[in-house]
Image: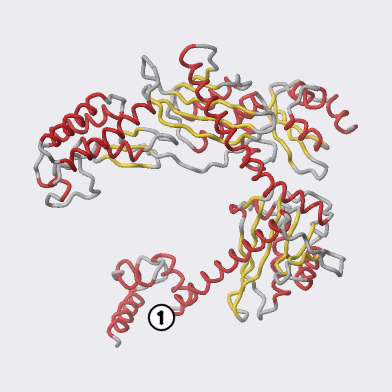
Amino acid sequence: MSVISDKLATLPEKSGVYIMLDEYENILYVGKAKILKNRVRQYFHNNLKSEKTMALVEKIADFRYIITPNEYEALILENNLIKQHNPPYNILLKDDKTYPYIRINVKDKFPRVEVSYRLRSDGAKYFGPYMLGISVYDILEVIRTVFPLRHCKNMPKKECLDYHIGLCSAPCSGKVTSEEYASYVSDVIKFLDGDYKFVEDILRKKMLLFAEKEEFELAKHYRDVLGILEKLVRKQTIPFKQDLNIDVFTMVGNGLYSVVNCFSVRGGKFLGGNNYPYYDVDNANGLASFIMQYYGKNHILCNEIITGTELEFKEELADYLGQKAGRKIVINTPSGGIRKQLVEMGESNGTEYLSAQMEKFNRYQELTVGAVEQLKKLLSLPVLPRRTECYDISHISGTNKVASMVVFTDGEKDSRHYRHFKIRLPGNNDFASMHEALTRRLEKIGNCDDLSFSAKPDLIIIDGGKGQLSSALKAAEETGHSDVCFISLAKREEEVFLPGKSESVILPRNSLALKFIVRIRDEAHRFAITHHRNLRKKQMTESELTKIPGIGRKKAAALLSAFHKIPAIKEAGEEELLAVEGINRKDAENIKKYFEETENEV
């Protein structure tokens, strides 16, 4: 603690970012501060800490800080460091889900209504995003039933079934003028902007009309769609007297677990929301970080952001988002009125979600972080293996040899860091192959632009027994990385072998630790097998192409890179073939001739 005490005394009274480290110099937490001296001291001098903060402070062995020119730069730097290092005590938006929009390309003569998961600057009108609780397909069903717009991507030359059952006005065959069609589109836009009453009237009139005609199937269909509309209206109704576009972020917690609720209001209508588990130890700091990450993945379509917690970096965040959106963005923490009601709605939803998810949260911690902590304890590992890598070799009789590297972070799959090695050594010596793969991997630690290779693992798991482990340890010694922990896992009895011990360790069959290492071992095996099969398939395909006169492996690879599959090469014209690098006129003729001849073979 003396190291920390000495550093606390020299902290500057300037803005910046601070980085908390454990005894192994792993990054535990990244935070931003308007005044570094005041903020960092709070962790060690303030007795009013949450359970999460106390758990963090117990693990801090040292800290670093980076002074920034201003508070705005501190906000940006913190965001970049969190994304790069994924610290365990920071909030991290792991949800990669993109939400749907409704798109109408008003530049088309006869536009159609479609779902889009990407918002482009293409002149089309977009409505959304529609989050959990509001089904975009329910909205489309109402539109399809009420407005006779085309649904086909490419207009046919004559009317289809949709026209004959009253769902399309058949612009393809001139059954409707462009002016009439435009009026339908205008009504759809009015409906999507929140005017539901005239649509409800249309559905009700048609339901009664078909009931009077005793066409009960059609009457039932309109009744069902009317029911869908009524549900949508109930879900989307918020008592706004004005059209506002707002995103709302609220946070609730129980001292140990927290959740952020996020939802959108567009044109005064609720478009659904979502809940995100929240791990940050600093509420005001963490919520600003969450909002930064959220808009890194989603478009900024609102004009105002409401938060349930006063943000310390509110002005800097508004500035950053305004520059990103190209217009002014206001951030408010309301104390009353309709905006306060929106905050209370978000907090209510978050509380309900947190209550329902507590059991799942605990189970998640058990299976991931809990499993890793148990593994450290049962095997007496010198460090907690936050980053665990596992390696497996795959080949058939020494051909197409590959090694897989899979990575788990805090007990959870981290597939963005998975890598393959194509083994260069001849023969089918698994020990030598493992030695080669580990040598090539360990040589890259701290010496590579690839973040996965440059990162130092806390634990490496080898698929195999004593022989494979010995090969890996030899590679570690030769590359100067003997400080990395190694174990191996033999398949037959799930025995764990440790360096320097002749006897294997048998972990309890029902232990989370054993389930974790079996899970990562099986993932490494799956990843290796999949890559090996792809190589064999590619080799077989290349072999087929190299039967063609003048086509060697290099030209075959170029053809596959351009067309991906043999049937596509077979159907390609000469000019398309000539566009491939290395293919000349004679090659193109030979390719066409070869496939013509093989097609005619009996």
Picture quarter containing residue 232? top left
Mark 1 residue element: loop
The residue tagged 1 is: 550
Looking at this rendering, what residue extends furthest in the right direction?
2
Q: Position of residue 330 (x, y in %)?
A: 49, 19
Q: Position of residue 342 (x, y in %)?
A: 48, 20
Q: Position of residue 480 (x, y in %)?
A: 81, 60
Looking at this rendering, what residue extends furthest in the top direction?
336
Which residue is more in the foreground, 297 or 16? Answer: 297
Q: Amino acid at mark 1?
A: Gly
Q: Is residue 519 left or right of residue 222?
A: right
The C terminus: image quadrant: bottom left
The N terminus: image quadrant: top right
Q: Position of residue 174 (x, y in %)?
A: 9, 43
Residue at 52% x, 25% y is 346
Q: Is residue 251 left or right of residue 267?
A: right
Picture quarter containing residue 394? bottom right
Near mark 1 (Cα within 10 A), the count class, few <14, some 14-19 or many ≥20, is some
Q: Is residue 426 above or below residue 362?
A: below
Q: Is residue 49 above or below residue 156?
A: above
Picture quarter containing residue 583? bottom left
Q: Is residue 291 left or right of residue 557?
A: right
Residue at 22% x, 50% y is 154
Image colouring: secondary structure
